[in-house]
Amino acid sequence: MHTKTAERSNEVEISLERAPSDPPQFSDEYQEVLRKLIEELKAVGVNVTPYYDMQAAAAISGGLNGDFTILSKTGSALATIIVAWLHGRYGRKAKLTVNDTEIEIEGSSAKDVERLLKLAQEHQRESRSKLVHE
């Protein structure tokens, strides 16, 4: 059975919070940082859907707001890319949201992020199992 609920339960939402020393959110420079991140994710096979601020997108080239939805079945490559982004500037943060459970990451290692992604996958499997048995 393939439903929207099942699809949704396979997703992880990632929200990237820029550091105070990063360029402004909708500057060309920071938009390029986000575009490169998306390219890196896609290059390793991560199914990623970026979100845009429509008002900013209309006014400038881009409008990426730093929020993404990804399929959770991706692991170490995704973790490595997130950690590289986090380490790119002191003070960056990433939040993972799985089925309304938020996990905030700051200066973690790729191993830590991969472990959190695995925990997220386990949480999703348990949630799907509960849906099937209800």
Image: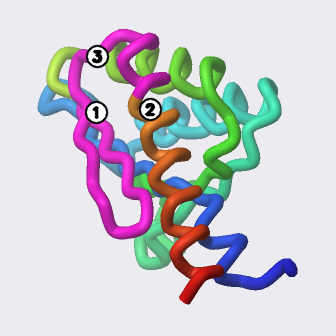
Return the x and y of residue 68 as percentages of the image width and height.
52, 54
| Distance (Cα) linking label 1 and label 2 | 7 Å
Residue that numbered label 3 is attached to = 108
Q: Which of marks 2 and 3 is nearer the N terminus?
A: 2
Nearer to the camera, 123 or 65: 123
In the rendered image, the quadrant that contains the N terminus is bottom right
Residue 79 at least partly seen:
yes
Provide the residue designation for mark 1. 23
- Which residue appears at 47% of the width and 26% of the height? 82
Determine whether 53 is above or below 68 in the image: below
Q: Residues within 10 Å of mark 2 (few under 14, many from 20)?
A: few
Badge 1 vs badge 2, beta-carbon distance below 8 Å: yes
**Residue 61 visible in this rendered orientation of the protein:** no
Residue at horizontal 71%, vertical 71%? 7
N-term mark: 3 or 1: 1
Whether residue 42 appears in magenta in the rendering, the answer is no
Quadrant where the C terminus lies?
A: bottom right
Residue type at mark 2: give it.
Glu
Q: Which amino acid does label 1 sit on?
A: Pro
Q: What residue type is labelled 3?
A: Ser
Residue 102: image location, x then y, percent: 27, 55
Q: Position of residue 37 (x, y in %)?
A: 58, 31
How packed mark 1 is, by other alpha carbons closer than 10 Å (few <14, some 14-19, many 20 or more), is: some
Residue at mark 2: 29
Range of the magenta residues?
Answer: 93-115
Q: Is residue 76 left or right of residue 39?
A: left
The image quadrant of residue 105 is top left
Front residue of 75/15: it is 75
